[in-house]
Amino acid sequence: MVSFRNGILKIQFDKKNDRNFYQLLFDICIYFGTIFYFLERTSLHYFGVGFFLVGTALVGFKRVIGFRFNNIAHTAWYLLFIAFAELSSLWAYAPLTSALRYIRFMLLIVVICFGVTQYTTSVADAERLVEVYAAAAFTIALIEFIGTPVEDWMAGYFGRAIGGGNTNTFGYILLFGAIIAFYKGYVKGKRWWYLPMIIMLAGCVLSSSRKAALMSVFGILFIMFFSFNRRNHFLHLAIAAIVVISAYLIVMTNESLYEVLGNRLESLFNFINDGTGGDGSLYKRDFYILYAHELFARSPILGQGFANFANLLYHEVGGGYIYAHNNYWEILADLGVVGFVVYYWFYAYIGLKLTGNFFKKKLSEIQTLAIVMFLAQLFLEWGVVSMYNLSNQFIIALIFACTFTDKFSDQKKYYYSDKSDGGE
């Protein structure tokens, strides 16, 4: 309530408005945090981190003054992993000082993701948060389309004009933005989300990221597949399959699109089929993974020590400090089977919850989105190292929040405009 009396402006909030005010501030922080963080080769990148931290501080403040904490499994998991990574300095090839830059940033990640999991106390919160992320991803796509000359859109590796960073990161953000946008349009009936989805899909294709292009398509198909309760379910799937095949044929036959993405897809399929015909990127990635196999074989239980794949690669092979381009094998090389279990037990925790609800036919709408994002993340980790990457860890926190939101929901305590029941 806003009042002006005796020359004094007063703003007072009741419980509902007070919560809505903090929600708005948090949403703004996540929106601008996602956008600015993407600008990784500019000074604005640090503003992104700042926005994320302010959002977490807002949520933490509300919790301290009277709201209970949500399920803290995500926070406990990541802190445990950080602790084991630090402990590995006792047997590491190189001392812990070489890994401190990762450890420091991982502590920052756990704080930011703590804000995400504590913010999400209902299905409505989860729905709103994924919308904010998709809106930020759409804005990033628009910024790149506006900032890149039209004649350079088809030049390959689209997504560097503003942020100047890795186009795989650009594709990664747009991939999940497109999946969320399709979910909002197809499942939630907000059809205006289809336009942002199309623009984000275009950005994925033009980025030349094979992972982003493939998983954006499969993600959309999986959203449709898991939406069993819709009328004409199999007809929709059949139409979608026809659209996907048509799009693939266009990419492979159009000269410009073939140069941007088609030839990279073709080289990937040839490489998977017989191990030949791949491009330089595929052979490099294959070499890094094979080297990770070798390091794992040397010390399969505890590994070579956190962040030591790059150190050993540099000293034994040369060519710079390079990560393994595969989260599974880098963890096995660095931290062995024990570290692998310490990290991936949490994925199993999420997976068991989602698959259990799926087979019990209790999968809620927001959990439909969660299971698709989860499958996409599992696939992507064959080509990225996610354990110390904020963009990846933010998505994992979102997946966790969408999966367990019903379990720790406070929706009976607060007021919500969305009365969705969820999946329990």
Image (cartoon, grey):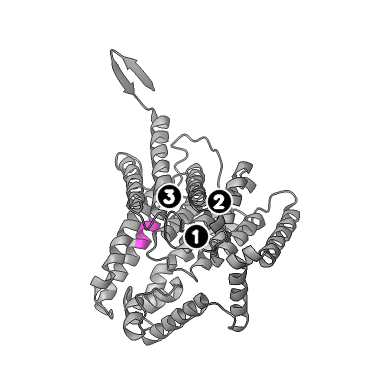
- 238 or 276: nearer the viewer: 276
Disc 2 versus disc 3: distance between alpha carbons? 17 Å
- The image shows residue 302, relative to residue 356, as above or below, that is below
Q: Is residue 163 magenta?
A: no
Residue at (44% x, 79% y) in the render? 288
The residue carrying mark 3 is: 35
Label 1 CA crowd tier, 10 Å (few <14, some 14–19, many 20+): many
Tell me where residue 95 appears, x and y as whole percent.
Answer: 24, 76
Comparing labels 2 and 3, the label whose residue is closer to the camera: 3
Determine the image quadrant of residue 316.
bottom left
Q: In which quarter of the image is residue 323?
A: bottom left
Marks 2 and 1, Cα distance to the nearest angstrom? 13 Å
**Secondary structure of the residue carrying numbered label 3:** helix
Is residue 334 depicted above or below 344 in this figure? Answer: below
- Within 10 Å of the Cα at label 2, are there few (<14), some (14-19), or many (20+) other Cα atoms? many
- Is residue 187 in sight in this rendering? no
Q: Are marks 2 and 1 in contact (CB under 8 Å)?
A: no
Q: Which of 359 and 214 is in front in this view?
A: 214
Q: Is 8 on the left or on the right of 338, as rendered?
A: left
Ranked by sequence position, the earlier of labels 2 and 3 is 3
Q: What is the number of the mark on residue 180?
A: 2
- Residue type pointed to by label 2: Ile
At label 3, counting other C-alpha atoms closer than 10 Å, the crowd grade (few under 14, some 14-19, many 20 or more) is many
Q: What residue is drawn where x is 63% and y is 67%?
A: 258
Whichever of labels 2 and 1 marks the residue nearer the N terminus, that label is: 1
Q: Is the magenta stretch mostly helix, strand or loop?
A: helix
Magenta-tinted stretch: 72-78
**Residue 293: percent from left, percent from top:** 44, 83
Circle 1 residue: 172
